[in-house]
Amino acid sequence: MVFCPGSEPAGARAGAATIRHRRSSGAPSDTRTQGDHVRLRDHPYDATHLGHAATYLAFDLIHRLWLDLGHDVQYVQNVTDVDDPLFERADRDGVDWRELADREVKLFRADMEALRVLPPHDYVAATEAVAEMVELIEKMLASGAAYTVDPEIGDYPDIYYRADATVQFGYESGCDRDTMLTLFEQRGGDPSRPGKTDQLDALLWRAARAGEPSWPSPFGPGRPGWHVECAAIALSRINSGLDIQGGGSDLIFPHHEFTAAHAECVTGERRFARHYVHAGMIGWDGHKMSKSRGNLVLVSTLRAQGVEPSAVRLGLLAGHYREDRFWTHQVLDEAAGRLQRWRTATALPAGPDAADVIARVRRYLADDLDTPKAIAALDGWATDALEYGGHDESAPTSVATAIDALLGVDL
């Protein structure tokens, strides 16, 4: 399966599907059917908000579309249960970081199950794969792609990846250096860290500090950096190449860029993933949902309030996955009303012909997951069924089955 990366021209086709990256404009075709690979990650330090949910729903649509096309999908999801925000939250709440991670992972899985997100083939915690990360770092040190900071300059002998270790660095994001530095500092990087060769060099191994968990390694006790976790898990779990590296648009740089670079400098491949797909941000009350702003709408909270998860799912699918958009009470109300109309229409003894609308839904989803058009097509069928009826006794069941399989909405 082929998806377009930021550096490639857009409109990549695979089988019957075309997915576009926000910067893309045409990519070569690839019709492999042996197996399709996609990777996502989860941070278990806070509950799932609708921004997270929208990203997972987008990739659930890809998963469902691939299955509908007859592909054998290998979907890997890793859990970053070794991360500064997790330790900070655990310290704030006075709980053990492992207890917090376990609790939030269970809540995340419950939220995903409620939203009917198909589970991954592999669900891997970072703490389960430290050995793979250490091995990857050893290879980078041996090749010169990584170096150890002089502790007399930088206090600790941390290990960093050289941003210039591959000539293609920057292809995934398309960012210039100034933009990279800005985003690097905003999104977990440390450009001002003394002892680094380049401000953009990324942390691979954080030497042990007092009060922090650590693991043994040939280069001393410590813990892995953010990006190397994902590279090591993907390389160890998907051996035949990654079709999609996916996530929210805020992961384009630095996370996905460095994840790709770490893997590429070791494997010699010019492209870690064939394509990169990024979902837009979800806003609430005039701003992007964020923990720091405190404007989060949590899936678990909506569930506790009695909001039907199918309505939440349908409300998020009403917007295109790549677009930044706002969640509002109106969005939820419209989704709940649509859900009821679809249920009423598909419960009729007969309805208009189903073949055409199902074919259109498949076509729209295969064209960059165009859920607004797919939903509009189903709205049209439901309106015709409710207002004019029909003579096809199998149509209501066929449409309900297609909505379930392709959109993941339970009628």
Image: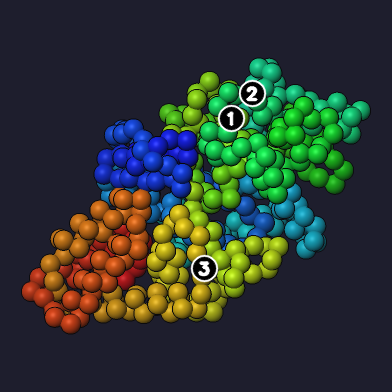
First along the sequence among labels 3 and 1: 1
Residue at the spot x=45%, y=75% of the render?
332
How far is mark 3 from mark 2, CA to CA?
Answer: 40 Å
Residue 356 rendering spot, x and y as whole percentages: 16, 61
Residue at 50% x, 23% y is 269
Residue 277 vertical position relative to residue 207 in the rendered view, above or below: below
Q: Is residue 57 left or right of residue 346?
A: right
Which quadrant of the view contains residue 221?
A: top right
At x 37%, y 46%, the residue is 19
Residue 361 percent coordinates (x, y)? 26, 59
Residue marked by disc 1: 169
Q: Which residue is mark 3?
A: 326
Q: Amino acid at mark 1?
A: Phe
- Circles 2 and 1, Cβ within 8 Å, touching? The answer is yes
Query: In this image, 152 relative to 299: left or right?
Result: right
Mark 3 is on which residue type? Phe
Residue 264 in view (yes/no): yes
Q: Looking at the figure, which quarter contains the C terminus?
A: bottom left
**Is 332 on the left or on the right of 100, as rendered?**
left
| Residue furthest to the left | 391
Residue nearest the viewer, comparing 130 with 182? 182
Name the residue tied to disc 2: 165
User: Counting other residues with Cα less than 10 Å from the Cα at mark 3, is it few (<14), some (14-19), or many (20 or more)?
Assistant: some
